[in-house]
Amino acid sequence: MDISRQTAKIMVFASLLFAAAIYLVLFDSLSETEMVRLSYIWLPVCISGAIAWKTGQSTLTGTLLWAGKTMLLLALFFELVFPML
């Protein structure tokens, strides 16, 4: 199954709206750790959508692989680098 450019745009903009809601609207009600942990939700969707948008057509499998790679990199960053900051 292919993801069209229109669907990819929706993925990017929806995930950016979610991030804006977290960091602008819910800023006072969430701790920094909670906001960082919520990036596991919006960032993989944004990355996958951006890649599908740039390439024009992307398979669902490829998009899910990019989402998985993004989550792995986030996990490594948050567990290894973020505590030292």
Image (spheres, rainbow, N blue to C red):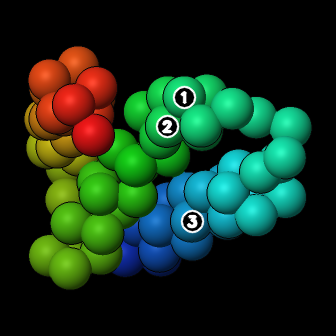
Q: Which of marks 3 and 1 is nearer the N terminus?
A: 3
Which amino acid, by three-letter code, is at mark 3?
A: Leu
C-alpha span from label 2 to label 1: 5 Å
Q: Are marks 2 and 1 in contact (CB under 8 Å)?
A: yes
Q: Identify whether 5 is placed above or below 17.
A: below
Residue neighbourhood size for the residue with mark 2, other residues' Cα within 10 Å, grouped as few (<14), some (14–19), many (≥20): some
Task: Tell me the number on the disc at residue 83.
Answer: none
**How many marks on residues?**
3
Which residue is label 3 attached to?
Answer: 16
**In this rendering, does residue 64 appear at all?**
no
SS for dot 2: helix
Task: Tell me the number on the disc at residue 33.
Answer: 1
Measuring 70% from the left and 50% from the top, which residue is drawn there?
A: 22
Which amino acid, by three-letter code, is at mark 1?
A: Thr
Q: Quadrant of residue 16?
A: bottom right
Measuring 49% from the left and 37% from the top, which residue is drawn there?
A: 36
Q: Quadrant of residue 64?
A: top left
Residue neighbourhood size for the residue with mark 1, other residues' Cα within 10 Å, grouped as few (<14), some (14–19), many (≥20): few
Q: Of all residues shown, which one is farthest toward the front?
A: 85
Which amino acid, by three-letter code, is at mark 2?
A: Val
Q: Do the residues labelled 2 and 3 touch (CB within 8 Å)?
A: no
Q: Which of marks 2 and 3 is in front?
A: 2
Q: Identify whether 19 is placed above or below 61.
A: below
- Quarter of the picture containing the C terminus is top left
- Quarter of the picture containing the N terminus is top left
SS for dot 3: helix
| Left or right: residue 15 compared with residue 60 | right
Which residue is label 2 attached to?
Answer: 36
SS for dot 1: helix
How far across and down, in percent of the image, does residue 15 sit?
Answer: 55, 57
Measuring 47% from the left and 74% from the top, which residue is drawn there?
A: 9
